[in-house]
């Protein structure tokens, strides 16, 4: 069990060993997202279901949460029931948009799929193997953005976290190309544990300018951002 202390919290969430535990990025996305009454929401990479639950509590008509982790879907369903939003949430196991009903059009897409480079994921243990963001951390978010347009209502909003611990520029450029209108909603500098910043794979990615970590005093810092793209 973990306690969510972000927007609309505190509330408890069940997590299984393979479930992503809500992070600083989850808190930032939760604070940034706008959900209107009767909106249809897709929560891509829903994990424990925390952002789906918040979207439902903010008034969404229905939230479709998807995650690749089988156990996570059972967990998200149980968490939504414990928060009294089981009538407005439905969770699917699968890859990206593949399990969603045909013809579904969303007003809001929460696009929080894994965006951590595979080597960083391995060094940090932040993601189980096979569920991280690809070699540069941009591959999975880019695949999500490419598929997203087919599932968005015109004028719908995508809430998209990015960070300097991935090839962030590729994601922002692609979002701009695909959606035209994007704007940054928030930004936070986050210390990187020394076990991670001293990892040879991470030092190499920083030298190759794939990721951007900066020194502040004795600590290394990375930057997380949340963007809004309008379909
Ligand atoms: C950064 S976590 C976010 C979880 C949740 N939104 C939160 O804030 O706690 C990303 C999630 O994406 C899921 N994921 C990874 N690859 C996926 C894919 N191909 N399709 C769907 N979900 C995926 C992971 O299992 C993980 O739960």
Image (spheres, rainbow, N blue to C red):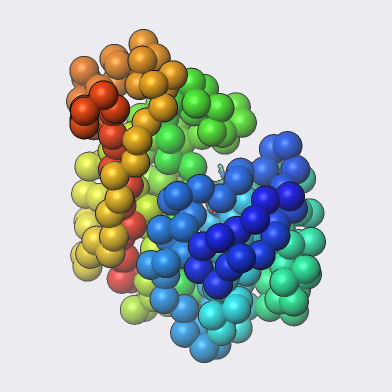
Decide if residue 160 is on the left or right side of residue 168: right
Give the residue at the far front of this rendering.
217
* Total numbered badges shown on the rendered structure: 0
Quadrant containing the C terminus in the rendered view: bottom left
In terms of depth relative to the viewer, which is nearer, 30 or 46? Answer: 30
Q: Residue at x 67, y 51 (%)?
A: 2
Give the residue at the far top of this rendering.
200
Position of residue 69 measured from the top left corner of the image (x, y, whole percent)? 68, 43
Decide if residue 65 is on the left or right side of residue 135: right
Vertical arrangement, residue 187 with respect to residue 35, above or below: above
Residue 80 in sight from this viewpoint: yes
Decide if residue 208 is on the left or right side of residue 98: left
Vertical arrangement, residue 63 with respect to residue 209, above or below: below
Give the residue at the far bottom of this rendering.
37
Q: Residue at x 46, y 72 (%)?
A: 108
Vertical arrangement, residue 204 with respect to residue 22, above or below: above
Position of residue 220 measured from the top left corner of the image (x, y, whole percent)? 28, 28
In terms of depth relative to the viewer, which is nearer, 183 or 83? Answer: 83
Decide if residue 149 is on the left or right side of residue 95: left
Q: Classify residue 116 by image quadrant.
A: top left
């Amino acid at each position: 069990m973990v306690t969510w202390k972000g927007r609309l919290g505190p509330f408890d969430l069940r997590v299984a060993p393979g479930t992503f535990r809500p992070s600083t990025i989850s808190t930032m996305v939760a604070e940034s997202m706008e959900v209107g009454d009767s909106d249809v929401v897709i929560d891509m990479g829903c994990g424990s279901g925390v952002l789906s639950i918040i979207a439902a509590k903010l008034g969404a008509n229905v939230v479709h949460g998807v995650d690749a982790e089988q156990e996570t879907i059972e967990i998200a369903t149980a968490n939504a029931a414990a928060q009294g939003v089981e009538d407005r949430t439905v969770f699917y196991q699968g890859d990206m948009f593949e399990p969603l009903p045909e013809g579904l059009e969303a007003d809001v897409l929460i696009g929080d799929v894994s965006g951590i480079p595979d080597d960083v994921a391995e060094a940090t243990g932040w993601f189980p193997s096979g569920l991280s963001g690809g070699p540069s951390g941009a591959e999975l978010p880019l695949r999500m953005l490419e598929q997203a347009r087919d599932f968005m209502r015109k004028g719908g909003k995508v809430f998209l976290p990015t960070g300097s611990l991935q090839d962030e520029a590729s994601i922002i450029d692609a979002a701009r190309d695909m959606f035209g209108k994007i704007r940054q909603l928030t930004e936070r500098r986050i210390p990187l544990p020394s076990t991670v910043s001293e990892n040879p794979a991470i030092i190499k990615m920083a030298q190759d300018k794939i990721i951007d970590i900066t020194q502040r005093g004795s600590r290394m810092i990375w930057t997380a951002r949340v963007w809004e793209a309008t379909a």
